[in-house]
Image (tube, rainbow, N blue to C red):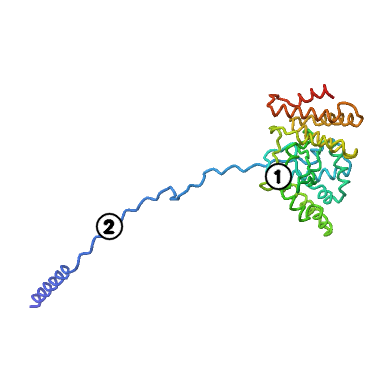
Amino acid sequence: MHSSLTKVLDRARAAIQGRAAASAPERPEVHQAAPQPISSTPQTLTQRPTELPEPRTLAVYPEAEQVQGARYLNAGERRVWHFLHRLAADVGRERGYSQTPSQVSFHCPAVTIAGALGMTDRHLRRLAGGLERAGLLDCGGHAQQVMSRNMYGGTLWAVLTVPGAEPPRLRADEWRHNWRPDFETDVVNKRGAIKEMSELQAESAEAERLYQTAKRWAAAQTTSNDPPPPSSDILGPIDLRGVLDGLAGLWRLHSTKRPRAVGRLGSQIAGLLGESDRRRYWCGVIWQALTAQDEGRTGGLQALMGQFDRLAADLREGAPWRSPGAVLAARLKASL
């Protein structure tokens, strides 16, 4: 009896479980996506350069003592030389020269340099003359046109920067360059180097601050007054009008002002003719003509100006000379 009841219950339980399994909804089969391989190439829009550009190498400037060499300088000249050499090296770095030039030319008022050194403008000029004679410096006053007048705007300095190189010489393009494009504004507003230096001296400014003031003047450049390149190997069109004007006014100068004017003209002529190594020759030619003019002899300044005028006319007509300076020297030898 008991076994029969157990069999009935087991059949009933199996029937119920079968109906429940039949009524349960089937679970959908889930398929997992196969893992994708990781790409070794970064998914970026732009690729970084594999090689960085080489850093630009700036020129290295020898020390002032190395450039001076065996040249003798007294204490005052040596002080001015060290100041100008430091200024030239800093200007070269500011301009980003990649190769050391034999000279660095810059524009800076003499009153600024004199004030930084604690001396008068006149004393500075005397000491600078000693550096010129030693072959370390070439300098001269630079004028610019302001309101139809030529006014002194500062001083040009050409400083030797390589030991054993030829003495520095200011080139014609440097004399013509507009070093102070804002000069007229300074004149109208009555501000400039003299006023600035007076204020600094009144404040008892330290020596380094005074030097940085001179460096600001010397290294100043804008898009309108980028300095000429340090190389003078390539000559532009020769323009002798400035030489003719300089010769015309030379005879009227006082005897104390003639040496500087002759030196400036000699540099200008040598630069225009591409003969920087013959500056002394052209200075001698000018002195010879000036002496003849003073003594009333033939072959004076008028004859020299005539030869320059003739050379200018020949060049305008396209004379095929490789060395205009040699042609001019031959003509002068016959006429002076």
Residue reaching furthest top?
334
Q: Which mark is residue 215?
A: none
Pick whichever, 227 or 95, lies toward us. Answer: 227
Q: Is residue 108 above or below residue 199?
A: above
Give how far across and how far down residue 272 sits, in percent.
74, 32
Q: Residues within 10 Å of mark 1 (few under 14, many from 20)?
A: some
**At x 88% / y 44%, what residue is drawn?**
76
Residue reaching furthest bottom?
1
Q: Which mark is residue 31?
A: 2
Give how far across and how far down residue 174 sits, in percent.
74, 39
**At x 31% / y 55%, what residue is drawn?**
33
Give how far across and how far down residue 270 sits, in percent.
77, 32
Give how far across and how far down residue 186 sits, in percent.
76, 53
Mark 1 or 2, closer to the camera:
1
Pick whichever, 336 or 261, lies toward us. Answer: 336
Q: CA distance from mark 1 to mark 2?
A: 71 Å
Quarter where residue 287 is shown? top right
> How many circles with numbers are drawn on the protein?
2
Quarter where residue 231 is shown? top right
Q: Secondary structure at mark 2?
A: loop
The quarter of the image holding the C terminus is top right
Q: Which mark is residue 93?
A: 1
